[in-house]
Amino acid sequence: MADMRNVNNWHWVNKDCRHWAKNYLTEKLVGTSAARDSSQVVITSLDECTGDVDLNQRKGKLLAIYDVALKMSWQGKLKDGSTVYGNITVPEVAYDTDMDDYVFDIQINSGSGDEIKRLIRSDLVPLIAAKFSHLTRDLVDQHSSDLYADKNSAPSTPELVQRKNRNAATTPSSAATKIVEDKVVKTSIIEHSCDFTGATPREIYETLLDPQRAAIWSHGKAKVSKRIGTDFELFDGNVHGTLMQATPGKSIMQTWRLKNWPQGHFSTVTLTFKETQEGTTVKVNQVGVPVGQEEAIRKNWMGYYWNAIKDSLNKGQLQHLPIQNDPLLGLLDTKYLILCIFMTVLIIAFTAYQVAPTIKM
């Protein structure tokens, strides 16, 4: 029986979709990357998503109305091997804004700016704008089904009312749009966990970032480091990326890709270590996995990483190795810090001796 309060779905029905939009944009944007001439940049997080996102229905027709402001963090790798960080602010992502009209405010928090800004402007920004273009249709697909009080009069395919751009700007040509969208990699998020019996969080942390340990469980040359901003390679380069954050015994964040993924596309992996009564649980969150590869990636983690590490631990191949010093703030090795402090003290003492007044007897 139809809802008599809204016969034929005549009256206006509104649905607040802000929470969905933030999760949707996080999934679509985090892991988006671009690379050119040995430089690369990747979106690492969606830090802010504020504004309104509503889906409305009246007379059986749908109208998506949204206007949000976004702030994203990114990490870049320059030709010289240095790492830079920053954020991108988009003050308005709205239902009636064309791709060419989005404003991207690029900020550099550390490091040189010109080279990475050019890469972001030329390659990364078009990818982000293209992902914005799918928001309206995906919003309707996800949230239109429960907006019809009178189910009998609901159309089999919801009719979306498209609103014209408020500035009456022309729409980019179909050819230009296709070029941009051809670069877009549809992605998803995968999560899993693994339990290690008899191993502490610090031991698992060391196993992943210490080159000597990693070479044992990966059965080959391993290029890994605890120093933030350094690149890593495992399994003959089939897995590689950049270390972004590392908290000893607590967590690791890194960009991560398979060699056969689309050129320049990286996912973002966050590993969290939790101590348990039996040992350690490692939780994995990986954002930016190409759609269709989710199950294969999970199996690769279990087989090539976790089961291999368990086997090495059971054989006693890792426990005897000493724990290496942690870099200061993840950047400087402790031994170099001690040397710098020692040299500074010597310089100060020598300078003080040189300028001290001569005492006359």
Image (cartoon, helix red, strand yellow):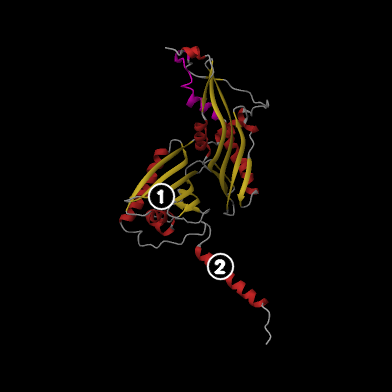
| Residue 112 shows in this picture | yes
Q: Amino acid at mark 1?
A: Phe
In magenta segment, residue 172? no
| Rendering coords of residue 242 (x, y %) | 51, 50
Is most of the magenta stretch helix, strand or loop? helix
- Which residue matches tag 1? 273
Task: Using the rendered view, name the quadrant where residue 217 is placed.
Answer: bottom left
Q: Residues under labels 2 and 1: Cα distance?
A: 33 Å
First along the sequence among labels 2 and 1: 1
**Which residue is located at x 40 percent, y 63 percent?**
322
Q: Amino acid at mark 2?
A: Ile
**Which residue is located at x 47 percent, y 52 percent?**
233
In magenta segment, residue 151? yes
Using the image, tell me which numbered label, if any, was put on residue 341. 2
Q: Which residues are magenta?
A: 134-153
State yes or no: discs 2 and 1 in contact (Cβ < 8 Å): no
**Which residue is located at x 30 percent, y 57 percent?**
315
